[in-house]
């Protein structure tokens, strides 16, 4: 099975856990069988490999998410990087060209596309496998998954099949409706359109060449920022007469809000929190090193992270986005391919960060022109290079670097340190990279 997972968005509806780098699919909130917590993308990837251990998985995403994906899934995952956001048709075209030109997938093989963050069980991935097999037959140019609706939702578009069979041709599509219109659609046998579909690689590649005009993956990547923003539905699906739909009646949830996300939590509290007996239907997610105490609350979600604190009625939490749009602050926590960082303190002239490096990882050789840095190693072992001089470091070691000094660190074991940046103009753009000097 060749599967493309669409990973997008900043997930502001799950603030304060989500930010421009850490979208909702990377929040570790689901308890796995081994007792550890995993994110949506880790859960989905694990489920895919459970159903088909040989599946080729490619994630189509922006460059800001690449480090987090490598951190959570490892270095071997295929990633089709969008240089900028251009909606789903350009993203799928680029991923399809990536599969053919970089991964060597045959033009006749089928490809399944789906969002990276559904909350589903293994039967969903069995259905994806069947969807790909149906597309490989060539009876239709596109095979969509139609999800059996459980209520008249206003959040999804609808697919109206021509017949009631498991696999049917598509009669028509309907846009996201109001509640009463949704009831009417369901009475006609309509299915939710969850943005899941399959095709032979050649079909979408030909469509991409027809609508965009490019030679190969590299050429498409280079001109990506010139492409028109357009969804796959508008560019391809609504203009294609030869489409089938396959029904899926299993559990399927879009965990896009705090209200829906807390429904999937296996326990009411994640992190340091206490609820008294008068609380009912309360969920707490606490990433801070301070306790949260809730008393007498009903139907409330409380979430605390370095980005901020949310206390909300669960229903009202769905309307958070315009309020978060008013908040302008730097990223306070992020997972990277090499580890993670958490901002501890921000003042005029100084920035204090806790940095964790995974074993064997580190930073590139670089300098800063407008700030000094002090590294205080708190645990683990590593190797530091300062202006070409190498030295081992361990807990309690302190390294001081003035502006213009070239430096880097590599972790031998997991390495944690406190980094203090000092300067009048502290900026992520104040960084110059170098080749190592030996």
Image (cartoon, grey):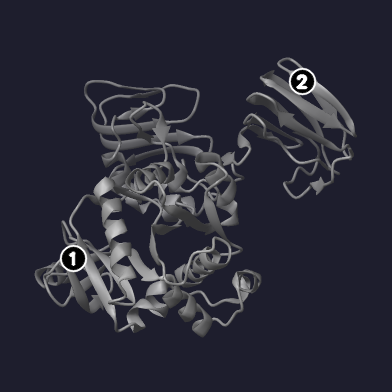
Q: Nearer the viewer, mark 1 or mark 2?
A: 2
Instruction: Give the side of residue 82 with respect to residue 411, left or right.
Output: left
Task: Classify 10 Å Cα crowding around label 2: few (below 14), some (14-19), many (20 and above).
Answer: many
The residue nearer to you, when weighing 379 against 93, is 93
Quarter residue 137 falls in? bottom left
Q: Is residue 218 visible?
A: yes
Quarter residue 426 falls in? top right
Quarter residue 277 falls in? top left
Question: Secondary structure beneath disc 2?
Answer: strand
Q: Label 1 to label 2, Cα distance in Å?
A: 62 Å
- Seen at 36% across and 26% down, the residue is 35
Task: Note whether 402 is above or below 9 in the view shown.
Answer: above
Instruction: Give the side of residue 436 with respect to residue 39, left or right.
Output: right
Question: Label 2 belongs to which residue?
Answer: 393
Cβ–Cβ below 8 Å for labels 1 and 2?
no
Query: Looking at the figure, which quarter contains the N terminus?
Result: bottom left
Instruction: Give the side of residue 48 with respect to residue 82, left or right.
Output: left
The residue nearer to you, when weighing 323 against 302, is 302
Q: Is residue 328 visible?
A: no
Task: Classify 10 Å Cα crowding around label 1: few (below 14), some (14-19), many (20 and above).
Answer: some
Query: Looking at the figure, which quarter contains the C terminus?
Result: top right
Task: Note whether 304 is above or below 148 in the view shown.
Answer: above
Question: Label 1 belongs to which residue?
Answer: 179
Residue positioned most to the top: 396
- Seen at 12% across and 71% down, the residue is 184
Question: Secondary structure beneath disc 1?
Answer: helix
Q: Position of residue 304 (x, y in %)?
A: 45, 34
- Seen at 85% across and 41% down, the residue is 436
Task: Note whether 248 is above or below 13 in the view shown.
Answer: below
Q: Position of residue 76 (x, y in %)?
A: 55, 46
Of callouts 1 and 2, the N-terminal one: 1
Task: Note whether 2 is above or below 171 in the view shown.
Answer: above
């Amino acid at each position: 099975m060749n599967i493309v997972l669409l990973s997008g968005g900043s997930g502001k509806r799950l603030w304060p856990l989500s930010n421009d780098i850490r979208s909702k699919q990377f929040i570790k909130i689901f308890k796995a069988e081994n007792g550890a917590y995993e994110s949506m993308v880790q859960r989905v990837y694990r489920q895919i490999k459970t159903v088909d251990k040989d599946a080729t998985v490619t994630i189509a995403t922006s460059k800001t998410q690449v480090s987090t994906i490598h951190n959570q899934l490892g270095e071997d995952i295929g990633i089709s990087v969008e240089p900028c956001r251009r909606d789903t048709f350009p993203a799928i075209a680029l991923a399809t060209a990536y599969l053919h030109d970089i991964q060597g997938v045959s033009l006749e093989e089928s490809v399944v596309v789906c969002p990276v963050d559904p909350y589903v069980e293994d039967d969903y991935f069995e259905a994806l496998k069947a969807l790909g097999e149906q597309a490989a037959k060539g009876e239709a140019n596109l095979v969509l998954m139609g999800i059996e609706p459980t209520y008249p939702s206003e959040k999804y578009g609808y697919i109206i099949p021509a017949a009631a069979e498991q696999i049917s041709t598509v009669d028509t599509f309907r846009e996201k409706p109001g509640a009463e219109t949704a009831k009417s659609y369901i009475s006609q046998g309509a299915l939710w359109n969850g943005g899941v579909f399959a095709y032979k690689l050649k079909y979408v590649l030909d469509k991409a060449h027809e609508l965009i005009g490019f030679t190969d993956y590299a050429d498409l990547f280079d001109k990506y920022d010139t492409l028109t923003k357009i969804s796959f539905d508008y560019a391809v699906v609504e203009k294609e007469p030869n489409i089938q739909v396959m029904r899926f009646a299993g559990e399927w949830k879009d965990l896009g809000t705090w209200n829906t996300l807390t429904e999937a939590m296996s326990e009411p509290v994640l992190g340091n929190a206490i609820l008294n007996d008068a609380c009912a239907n309360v969920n707490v997610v606490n990433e801070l090193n301070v306790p949260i105490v809730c008393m007498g609350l009903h139907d409330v979600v409380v979430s605390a992270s370095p980005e901020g604190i949310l206390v909300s009625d669960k229903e009202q939490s769905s309307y958070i986005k315009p309020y978060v749009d008013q908040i302008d602050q730097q990223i306070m926590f992020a997972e990277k391919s090499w580890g993670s960082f958490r901002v501890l303190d921000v003042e005029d002239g100084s920035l204090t960060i806790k940095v964790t490096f995974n074993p064997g990882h580190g930073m590139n050789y670089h300098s800063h022109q407008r700030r000094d840095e002090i590294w205080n190693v708190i645990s683990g072992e590593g190797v530091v290079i300062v202006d070409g001089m190498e030295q081992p470091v361990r807990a309690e070691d302190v390294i001081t670097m003035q502006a213009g000094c070239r430096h880097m660190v590599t972790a031998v074991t997991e390495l944690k340190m406190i980094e203090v940046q000092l300067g009048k103009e502290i900026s992520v753009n104040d960084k110059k990279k170098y080749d190592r000097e030996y």
